Image (cartoon, rainbow, N blue to C red):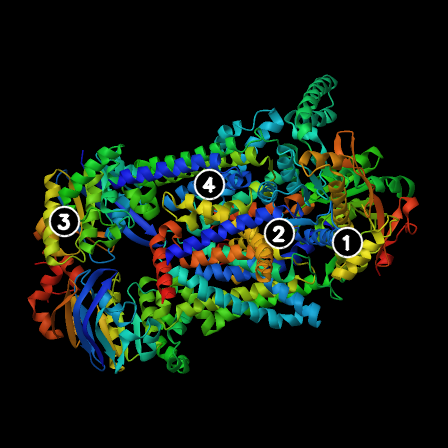
Amino acid sequence: MLKVDGVDVFYGDMQVLWEVSLTVGDAEIVALLGSNGAGKSTTIKTVSGLLKPQAGQIEFDGVRLDQIPANRIIHNGIAHVPEGRRLFTEMTVEENLIMGSLRPEAKRARTETMGWVYDLFPRLRERRKQPAGTLSGGEQQMAAIGRGLMAKPKLLLLDEPSLGLSPLLAMEIFRIVKVINDAGVAVLLVEQNVKRSLAICHRAYVLENGRMTLSGTGAELSANEKVKEAYLGI
Amino acid sequence: MTVNRGIVAQIAVLAALAVIPLVVHNDYYLHLLILALMWVVIGSAWNLLAGYTGQVSFGDAAFFGTGAYTAGLLVIHWGWSAWWGLFFGGIMAVVIAFPFGWICFRLRGAYFALATLALNEVLRHVATIWESFTQGMVGIMIMQSYISKLPYYYIALALAALSIIIIRLVMRSRLGYYFLSIREDQDAAESLGVNTHFYKMLSLVIAAWLTGVAGALYMNYMGFIDPHVVFSLHDISIMAILVGIVGGVGTTYGPAVGAFIMVLVQEMFRTAGFGYIKAAAKFTDVQFLISASEQLTKGHALGFGILVVLVIRYMPNGVVGDWGKLMIALRLQKTGRAK
Amino acid sequence: MDLFLQTLVSGLLKGGLYAVIGIGMTLIMGVMGIINLAHGQMMMVSMYITYSLFAYAGVDPYVSLLVSVPAIFTLGLFIQQRLLNPLLRAETILPENQVLMTVGVGMVLTEIMRFIFTSDYKSVRTSYSSSTFFVGNISFSVPLTIDFLIAILMTAALFLFLIKTDLGRSVRATAQDKEAAVLMGVDSERITYITFGIGSALVAAAGTLLIPVFYLYPDIGGPFTRKAFVICILGGLGSAVGAIFGGVTLGLAEAFGATYAGMEFEDIIGLVIFLLVLLFLPGGFKRITKV
Amino acid sequence: MRKTVATLSFAFALALMASSAAYAADPIKIGVVLPLTGTEANFGEIEKLSFEMALEEINAKGGVKGSPINVIFEDDSSKPDVGRSAIEKLIRQDGVALVGGGYSSSVTAAMAGVAVNNAFPLVINTGSADNITEPWTYTVSGQMAAKKKKAMSEETDAAKKEALKKEADELAAKAEQEAATIMPRYAIFRINPPASEYASGIESLLTDVIKPKTAALLHENSAFGTSSAADVEKRLTKLGVKILIKESYDKASIDFKPVLSKVKEANPDIVYMVSYVNDAALLMNQSMELRLNPKMFIGGGAGFTMPEFQKNAGKASEKVVSATLWHQTLKYPGAKEYYDKFLKKYNRDTEYHGAEAYAAMYVIADALKRAKSLSKEDIAKALSETDMMTVFGPVKFATYGKKANQNKGEAYVVQWIKGEQEIVWPKKYATTDVVFPVDWIKERQ
Amino acid sequence: MSFFRADNLVKHFGGLAAVNGVSFEVNEGEIFGLIGPNGSGKTTLFNLISGFYKPTSGEVYFMDRRIDGLKPHKINRLGLVRTFQVVRPLKRMTVEDNVIAAAFAQSGSLREARRIALETIEFCGLGRCKDMLAKSLTIGDRKRLEITRAMATGPKLILLDETFAGLNPSEQDEAIGLIRKIKASGVTIIIVEHIMKVIMTISDRVHAINFGQTLTEGTPSQVVSNPGVVEAYLGEAYHA
């Protein structure tokens, strides 16, 4: 479904990704692992069009994503839940969710999808009239994911969803990711929590210094000591 | 080697400017040059604060007006020569700069700009309302101390040279490096041991001093001021910015170039090419030229405004800053026409 | 007592008009962070449109809203798209170039109008221009009262637009987090010029409302630009409701200043409030009202 | 390519210079500085048209000394510094024989400085602040003497008062000497009366007819407004009228209701206003809205006599009286004709500013005719000997009091009656009787 | 008597405690590592120490002087300098000018400052690009410039914030060399780092935090074998 092929990305004249390739299949969870600064977020941002590759191409359901502006990406069925949640803090939870459903297909099903999101995150329903900025970290993450889901995406890009959350909340988030995936949404997951990620993903890639170094199924990589090395340096 | 060439060029320009009045006996042109030189001082001062220190002020008129009023008030209240204004006007502008800085430097970016604008407006109103002291809108009129323009020309030239020298010296010292680092990244500068508040203040004080001195020169030379003239948002504050931007922000000679361009171009628009277009029209008897010059005089402010918009749009770094771009554009045009 | 009440009433009514002037700017400044020094000049152009319609076609000013508002909306769109957006992208030493551009635009607009209409004072005298009604001893100007109601209507409309429509939400979202808005599928570039257009349209409405009670010449824009700044800083950037507060506060401050301190202090009072709010209540009334 | 362009443009420039030189020998060039853009362009336009009309007539009759007059109009943009650039250009670049114009007081003051420096004849038609034709104010001591005098008049302590008086006298004497050094270069002539004379016509109307005891005084804060108001205050105080309220305002104000409410509460016998056009209209409109009912509304010239005032204020302008310097019904030769011609030619109204400009052109032509040569000394001498009748009345530059080369002129009072301006005072010029008393509230039903 | 001591530092943002009671001591001449997962409060800690934030409570001592609440430039003058995680080069100045601006902390004269700057540039191995504009440097060189600039102020203690993020392995090795060189020149170092390999190799002691609180402190090997640390990094119960 998503095919990233040999992508080079630069910040100004500074190269940060070298020939990165990956694929995400239908209803698959793919984890993208790597230490800080390895280029995970960059990869995701390139997929969602915020950064444009200088070489290589990105294809999604036959559409060349690298050739359309960032704001059209979501119209192709890709929702990006950015790192740090990036909620519209002065808008209410509900408005944030609505903002996720601007594309016509999603707009038509707005109430319905919102019901589903609220079922997924009952806490959000309780707080739907509250400005997003007043939510706790976990609730904000839920709202961000919910906002992504409102687009009725075929592929959800999740960037560090468990960042800064307590272990309990992080676990909850991973559970939800699974639920979402079970509903037929493919997920490209960037995470620090290697263990958890590998446990729920179908396949995973490891990025090091802007290059893909490892890939395989979750189980394969869990067994691979190199993964641990990439993170802990031991 | 290049440095030497640079110095030679500077001395040559200075020498040329010094000789001009001995060759050009037209007082009108000297008048324009005096104004241009005065704007070199103001533009350079603004550039120090905005272009080098990154604090874009919309309130330069406050310092200019303070300098001018100091000179004028010295005359009408105490009977001193207005020339003392060159000394005290600068000092008073610095005095004004302190509350200015205290208020404005708490704010950043656009808010800073708006606060400077508002403070200048406050001063203008004070000068208008406080009639017993400033004579309000009646203004201050004094006679010039010299009938000849030469003294004014050389004083203006000296001040212009002085301001450029001061700015060059500043920029080659610790101050200059600190100013630039504040412009580039205030937090980084702070972490490198730069007392950013102090140095911003210092930059403001130097700029205010120069602007105040220019204001005092204006009083001496023009012989008439009122609050709307010297505290004018459009004619002083924004003109200072235009001089800086058109010439080139953050370059030593940008404001100087900008000052000459702005003063001369503005006057050229107003007078339809210093009256030459009209003369040519009469001489050649081409009706088109006559009506063109008439329309130009009628719409001189419009023409000037359009020019400003075009410069900002296409040369955002000014003539000096975008010199390369300008040259390329001109050459392109030329080759295009040659075909 | 009459004096006090009359001052209060004129301050309030004037404040309503100020609110409409400020509301457009608060949108532009709050959403896009653009300082628009041509705001008053846009209003001036709208006033000339209204004047021309009245003088040459006998169109009532309130009807000519239908022309002036869309016209200035288009003008705003154009300015943002063609003149400001390219500048925001260009790499320059000072981000404030954008401000200068609006100064240039203001100059050009003023001079175009002068070129066409000369500097003569124009005014639109309708049958109701000077009509008043009295409540006790207190006089209410009819057009200003109508304007006040329209001001409230427009604020409400804008408020609803921002809260209830997708486009409005997109505008707010872009203001809060441009990149996140892009991820939601918002064309942020388009939003910036639509916002500028709406902001301009609002001040166009203000101009059209003002002209029956005021008069017109090309240089009228400047003072109103400055007032608009005061109003939107008072109200808090980006807050429609804040603009009403800001406008009324300024109107009242000026009125009471004129009555109890002297008319010459009219302008300085607004400026002092402006500076105080900048310093001690950054964020304006929005901080208190939270809307 | 580049070379040819350079050569061509150089040749063109030479041709230009040659042309302007060759042309200069032919007509007599004079310069006129007026606000053609900026806030005062409205008045500048009327004056320019009047100048042009007079010029056409003069040139049609053969001009002066056999040559036509060529007027170079310069725009001062309503800004003193630009006005100064303009006069510098006229004197130095264009080599004009004399300079006319001068609308706003501030621009005129700035121009006056240049004229004195160059000992150049300057014929002012409007710029009315008193000090422009008071050479002593061009001296430092003169200005200080005035300050000391003012301080003295406000001082209550007798001993201190005496000391101040002494100082003031010393300074005045010094100013006298300094002025003597300026006089040889002083060739400034002013056709319209100074701001302080505008109200002179009103004075007798007040004593004879209105007989007020209290007054409110509102004025816009320009140089003209401020100095007029100061003079009116002096006159009223001298007449024993108590000033209850004196306020200045910025002419861009929207809302005068607060200050008018204050006036209403103070309930003065007269409301005296010095205003531009539209603030005048707003003031009257809003005082109508507030139902002010003093014995009389009096305008201090400028805006209150403009046709636009009546247009904008409508019925609120009815029965308002105003000081003025001219009116078309005055029995000056050509006054009515000028008014009609102007109306016909430009399809718009004119008023005293236009008449001043029209007269100024004739005064200038007359002086040029009589001047022995076109040197500035001869022209100045000819101007000082001016004694002629114009549409604006008799023009004769006199030196009286502290003033030098000032045309005394006369001030009149007009009243808006049924939408027309009528001269109502002084009696001998009056075309109709002054309408008094007026019930303003009834009047405006 | 200690060289550097942070005492029970607390920093609240709104209701949120970003740093909640962290204490540690640093001895003169050592490299002290500060680790923790993203968002654990390391950078906040740096901001507290270097004066960019004022602690809600707690104290910071440097060479027996209390420095919490002082302005950053004052703290710098005492000999404590920091780098930024997101590098902040003075973009439109050359590398040399960047460093000269910093070197003025040591001397008021331009000649002297330039001498110090050039020395430091050589010391840090940036000589090859000293005339380039800072904005055109590669990320590796930018990080290096950040350190060079800090060094040019003549510090006794330097705080390095994520110096290695985004460097490729060979650059990392160079950076390790540089840090060792800095230590050898007698400057004490506190380093925040995410790449454990680096921390392991160069630190003398390591302090681990998570959720703004201390997890553990000890030698690198002690810390990395602490289950809490492993859990914080890899997710709970990785060993399972």
What mark, if any, has residue B42 been given in the picture? 4
**Is the residue D53 above or below the residue D190 in the image?**
below
Asked whether B86 or B190 is in front, the reply is B86
Q: Amino acid at mark 1?
A: Met
What mark, if any, has residue D38 been given in the picture? 2
Q: Amino acid at mark 2?
A: Gly
* Residue, disc 3: E206
Q: Amino acid at mark 4?
A: Ile
* Residue, disc 1: D284
On the same chain: label 4 and label 3?
no
What mark, if any, has residue A102 been given in the picture? none
Tag 1 near tag 2, CB within 8 Å: no
Chain containing mark 2: D
Asked whether D37 or D62 is in front, the reply is D62
Q: Position of residue A45 (x, y in %)?
A: 27, 68
Nearest to the eye among marks 1 and 2: give it: 2
